Structures are given as structure tokens and as C-alpha cells.
Amino acid sequence: MTPRLLRSPTWLAVVPVLALLWAMVAPEKPAVVACVDLERVFAGLDRHKAGEARLTDLMKAEATKRDAISAEIQSLQAELENFKADSPNYQETARKLADAAGRLKVFEEFLKRKMEFEQAQVVRGTYGAIKAALPDLCKAQGIDVVFMDDATPPFDRADPRPITQQISGRRMLWFNPQLDITDLVIKKMNESFAAGKGS
């Protein structure tokens, strides 16, 4: 015999509500978390190495121009010693020397700024490539979220910020090394880079 409570309309109305409440509190599938040592990824990526190699070649070419101005200055300094201080040749050579020294100063400032800009472009490009590669890699591995490992690197004694500021900049105190997918990211991205011939 069915109990009267189970046959009542009130109980039948409560069942869907209980089911809904159970669905709300029932544990969902836990998120799969991974970590990446970003500094090691940068160091291990062939793409980044190629970018830095291009940057080195570019700077060598620019350094050749700087060396040419430096050689011109040395030549003018040697030439200046052959003239008397009050002679027209001395004054003309001194003017050329001052002009070359000014050009060298301007060029070195330009070279410094260009180096900083190009270095930033290489880093930005590599970081963008990492961000672009992670979605497909994580979907294939069933990973839901990737954290950047900032717990491993030691504090930099040369960092001008107080140690408390360096600590507050960290977001991770510890993680299980088994969650680290750094080598996998490097491997997959290098394979893609090689397949694309560096494009």
C-alpha cells in the first residue's frame, strides 16, 4: 500500500523543487588546472630564439654604422693634431669633429631606443604566440585553466622594489610539479614552428 504522503499532490509538487536544489548543490566536475614556467617557455621556444637572432643581426648592422662614425672621429682627432690651434684648417677640422661627435651621440641614443623597441616586439610576439597556442593545446589535454608559475623564481636582489612589494606581486605560493606543462608547451610550439618554417 502506497503511503498517503507519497500520493498527495503537495509531495508531487515538491519533488521537482528538490531535484532542482540537488542539481544546484551537487558537485560538478572539478576543474583541471595546469601551470607554466613562462620564463622557461620563452627560453625554450625556437620562435623566440629566431626572433632574438634576427635582433642580434639587426643590431650588428646598426653597430657597423656606429663604428664608421667612431672611426671618422678618430681620424679627425689625429688630423687635428697636425694643425696649429689658430689656423683655418684647425678650426675647420674641429668643426667637423664636433659635428661627428654630435652625430655619434644622436645615433647611439637612436640605437638604444631602437634596441628597446625591437626587443619589446620580439617579447610581445612570443607572448602572443604562447597565448594563441594554449587554447588548442589545453582542449586536447582536457585542461581548464593555466596559471603562470611565479613561485619558483627566486627574488632578484638587484630589483629596486622592497621585498614586500616583490612578494605582493606573486600569486602562487606552491603547486604540485605534476601540474607543470611547460615542457609540453615548448614541445608543441616548437613542432608548430618547425612545421611552419618559422612563419
Image (cartoon, grey):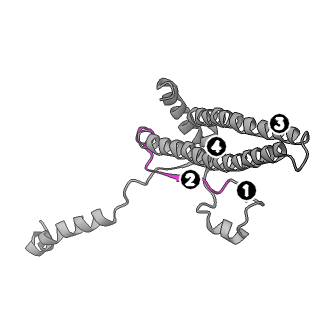
* Between discs 4 and 1, the one toward the N terminus: 4
Kindly report the distance in space between the C-alpha atoms of the residues bearing marks 1 and 3: 49 Å
Tag 2 and tag 1, C-beta contact below 8 Å: no
* Between discs 2 and 4, the one toward the N terminus: 4
Residue designated by label 4: 40
The relative height of residue 1 versus residue 135 in the rendered view (above or below) is below
Kindly report the distance in space between the C-alpha atoms of the residues bearing marks 3 and 2: 54 Å
* Quadrant in the picture for residue 27: bottom left
Residue designated by label 1: 154
Q: Amino acid at mark 1?
A: Pro
Please report the bounds of the magenta region as a residue range. Answer: 137-152
* Between discs 2 and 1, the one toward the N terminus: 2
Residue designated by label 2: 148
How many residues crowd mark 3 within 10 Å: few (<14), some (14–19), many (20+)? few
The answer to whether residue 93 is seen in the rendering is yes
x 82%, y 42%: residue: 89
Q: Amino acid at mark 4?
A: Arg
How many residues crowd mark 4 within 10 Å: few (<14), some (14–19), many (20+)? few
182 is within the stretch colored magenta? no
Q: Nearer the viewer, mark 1 or mark 3?
A: 3
Kindly report the distance in space between the C-alpha atoms of the residues bearing marks 4 and 1: 14 Å
- Identify which residue, 1 or 102, lies in the foreground: 102
- Identify which residue, 61 or 155, lies in the foreground: 61
* Relative image position of residue 135 (x, y in whole percent): 42, 43
Q: Nearer the viewer, mark 3 or mark 4?
A: 3
| Residue 12 left/right relative to 76 | left
Tag 2 and tag 4, C-beta contact below 8 Å: no
* Relative image position of residue 31 (x, y in whole percent): 44, 53
140 is within the stretch colored magenta? yes
Kindly report the distance in space between the C-alpha atoms of the residues bearing marks 3 and 4: 47 Å
Q: Amino acid at mark 2?
A: Met
